[in-house]
Amino acid sequence: MNSRLLMLLITLLSFVGTQFGQVKQESLQDLIDQAIKVSPKIKMLQSKFNVAKSNIEIGTNLPDPVLTLGLVNMPTNTFSFKQEPMTGKIVGLSQAIPFPGALSSASDVKSVDTSIVNQEISDLRNKIRKDVSDLYYSLQFIREDIRLSEESIKLLKQISNVAKRKYEVGNASLQNIIQVEVQITRVKDKIETLRGKENSVAAKLNALLLRNENTSIVTEEISPIASYNLNSDSLLKIARLNRPLLQKIKFGILKAQFMKKQAEYSFYPNFKLGIQYSQRDYNSKTDINFPDFFSVVVGVTIPINYGGKKTEKINKAIHLQSFYNDQYNSILQDLQHSFGNINGKISELENRENLITKSLLPQAEQSYKASIADYQVGKIDFVNVIKAENDILNIKTELAKVRVDYSKSISQLEYLSGKQLTSIE
């Protein structure tokens, strides 16, 4: 019975340990989605959107009517309602009415603000995608550098064993063994530096996800460079349709057009309609019960352009439209320049990966094997073996950097164009 309980306890502890030991596998897309979901800046912009939406109804409807209560022709010697026939109590109601179309024009101006804020939200999501991707790729490279450095230590230990065997038979000096141990120490020191960078980058990524800086982040292996074929003109067309910043400026142009139309209504008159009812009492002097009065009043504003104040509203809208047009064209120019630079870099990275994988790396590995063989028979100095091993580490590290730089370049293109160009798993 005791043995059964012991086995059950061991099984239970193993299961619990397994559950706690598991690290949640999160893809890059999962991290991006989570960062967007918890972003305080996006929530701030969503509140800004609600404010802009509420503003549409403010000042775009008829103003409140005005109720008037009063007394007319009240005699001051008696303050009696029955002394004079013109004395009465009045009740009036007036309503201001803007020129037809003026309210809808004001509504058009304010409604564009919601579209502008929507594009700000989209642009922020676009930036978060880029920021998370860049940190993720940096983390990939650092971890690959660590892995390659650990592999290098294994190779150096093998070299050390060769040097020790040669030393035992008197074919190598003690300095050879010391040299390899120094190199191992240097690589270990490099790994410790990389560990610090890894923790720093992981903390930044966790900060974007609003979680503890020590939360584990699992990264996938660095992928080889995939085929890519989009020229600057194609990317510029994509950006015109998808870049939120450009769409925001387009809505700014539209708002300026609506503002001009709204300003033009200031040259048209507004109206004011009022009705008034006057109630009179029985007059004791004349013994007559005088009838009540009913009045209707229509007022019209006279739109005088004092000092050109109304004209300047139109000029302001025209200047604002010109500003947004120039800003749009300026950004397109900057994008074309950026697309050209990034495409040039991508082409360079593709060629370098091809050169490293097909020439440099195989040659370095072959050189290392030859160095080991030549050293064992005493044809070359021990320094050449260390150099051959270090060349392999540097070339593999450079290959990882080339591939990560390629992924970052694609991420930059996606940010600038506003569209995901490659699939993220």
Image (cartoon, grey):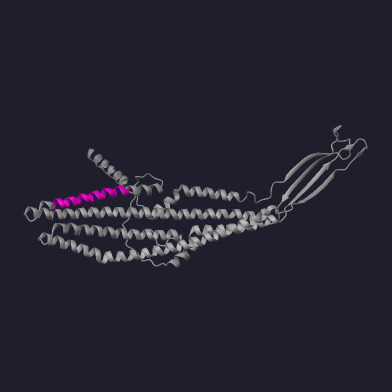
Q: In which quarter of the image is residue 412?
A: bottom left
Quadrant location of the C terminus? bottom left
In magenta stretch: residue 422? no
Res 79 → quadrant:
top right
Q: In which quarter of the image is residue 285?
A: top right
Identify the residue at horizontal 37%, vertical 48% (top origin).
204
Q: In this view, does 390 lie to the left or right of 262?
A: left
Q: Is residue 78 above or below residue 258?
A: above
**Residue at left 49%, top 53%?**
121
Does the magenta stretch mainly form a helix, a strand or a loop? helix
Q: Judge from the rendering whether residue 309 lies leftward or rightward of residue 142; answer left or right.
A: right
Q: In this view, does 348 lie above or below 310?
A: below
Judged left or right of residue 59, residue 233 is left
List the single residue furthest toward the top. 78
Q: Which residue is drawn at 38% across and 47% down?
A: 206
Residue 195 is inside the magenta segment: yes
Find the magenta span and give its range.
176-198
Q: In which quarter of the image is the N terminus?
A: top left
Where is residue 324? Give x, y as percent. Answer: 55, 59
Q: Residue at x 93, y 37 (%)?
A: 287
Image coordinates of residue 133 in percent, x first then y, are 38, 55
Residue 320: x and y, percent? 58, 57
Q: Nearer the viewer, residue 323 or 354?
A: 323
* In-front residue for pair 287/389: 389
Q: Nearer the viewer, residue 425 or 81?
A: 81
Residue farthest along the front direction in this orientation: 307
Q: Which residue lies furthest to the right in this view?
A: 286
- Image location of residue 275, percent across then percent down: 79, 47
Q: How many marks?
A: 0
